[in-house]
Amino acid sequence: MSATQVGADAGTGIREFTIGFAAAELDDMRRRIAATRWPERETVDDDSQGVPLAMMQDLARYWATEYDWSRCEAELNALPNFSTEIDGLDIHFIHVRSRHEDALPLIVTHGWPGSIIEQLKIIAPLTDPTAHGGGEADAFHVVIPSLPGYGFSGRPARAGIGPAEIAGLWAKLMAGLGHDRYGAQGGDWGGTVTTALALADAAHLAGIHQNFIFRLPQPPVPTAELTEAERAYLAEVAHWVDVEGGYAHIQGTRPQTLGYGLTDSPVGLAGWITEKFRVWSDCGSLSSS
């Protein structure tokens, strides 16, 4: 899969970026979906063993025969896409300026297993609030980067690129775009990066907003001193780590091993991600739709 970069700015190193996938690559993905070797059906009548077989087969059928990638590609390419190299990494980002010149620049960071596509719906209301019931003072110049290793950003060549390192990249990105004072927003890993950015570039940040704040309590916890609500929280965290946290452990410890299956099998990747989106949503059990 590929994309085209043109029009490098000699002064900033920022290049225009056009998304484009060869028909042969899309055909190969559809072939892989059609050739999926399916496991046996789960032995339970709920979602406790993971994404139900019937759901994944229906999703695969839709993906291979009905989903129109060209529409999504056109929507992305209708926006100003760019790429720039920061500390040896190619960083892809969308940069939409508001027609209101005094708008506050805002960098928005996605999480896992998300992407910049999740943020497309917020661009128009943020950059053109007067057309969406707001006022000129509500306007933002929006910057939406792809995290390293995600989407069209480059993959780090070494281990250890975490939220603090990414926050440093974002600070350099905003400086390179000429944004001396800006805000930051993030969710999931994007929220963690946003927190790190507040520490790394506080002199230039007007403020941050997060829709993800998560911190595991550090043992030992003096349970006798906890309120009932705090004990309930700890119990919920323990349940999450025990039942829902397996994916994070293997991704954090054996990413290369996991990568063989997720890279080779589109349906394998879809199943891995579908479970998380369903479990983390408020739409009921996995088997309910």
Image (cartoon, rainbow, N blue to C red):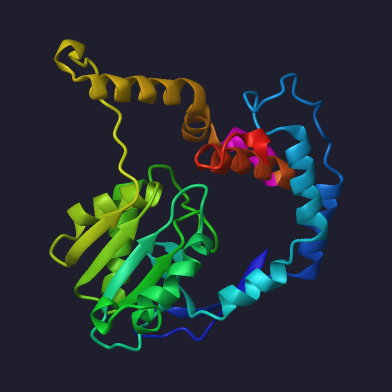
The residue lying toward the viewer, choosing from 128 and 261, is 128
2 is within the stretch colored magenta: no
The residue lying toward the viewer, choosing from 289 and 209, is 289
Q: Could you tell me residue 115's position as x and y percent? A: 51, 57
262 is within the stretch colored magenta: yes
Residue at (83% x, 41% y) in the render = 36
| Residue 265 seen | no
The residue lying toward the viewer, choosing from 189 and 262, is 189
Q: Could you tell me residue 134's position as x and y percent? A: 31, 78
User: Residue 160 occupies which quadrant of the picture?
Assistant: top left
- Position of 89 with respect to 262 (left or right) is left
Up/down of 188 relative to 217, above or below:
below
Look at the image and tell me in which quarter the N terminus lies. Answer: bottom right
Look at the image and tell me in which quarter the C terminus lies. Answer: top right
Residue at (30% x, 29% y) in the render = 216
User: Residue 62 occupies which quadrant of the picture?
Assistant: bottom right
Q: Could you tell me residue 220's position as x and y percent? A: 22, 15
- Position of 242 with respect to 36 (left or right) is left
Residue at (41% x, 85% y) in the render = 9
Q: Could you tell me residue 215's position as x and y percent? A: 29, 34
Q: Count all numbered tags in the image, as a single digit.
A: 0
Work out which residue is located at the far top of the displayed protein and give it: 224
Work out which residue is located at the far front of the displayed protein and give it: 133
| Residue 209 seen | yes
Up/down of 29 relative to 139, above or below:
above
Write the start and end of the magenta stretch as one range.
256-263
Identify the main secondary structure in magenta: helix
Residue at (48% x, 30% y) in the render = 253
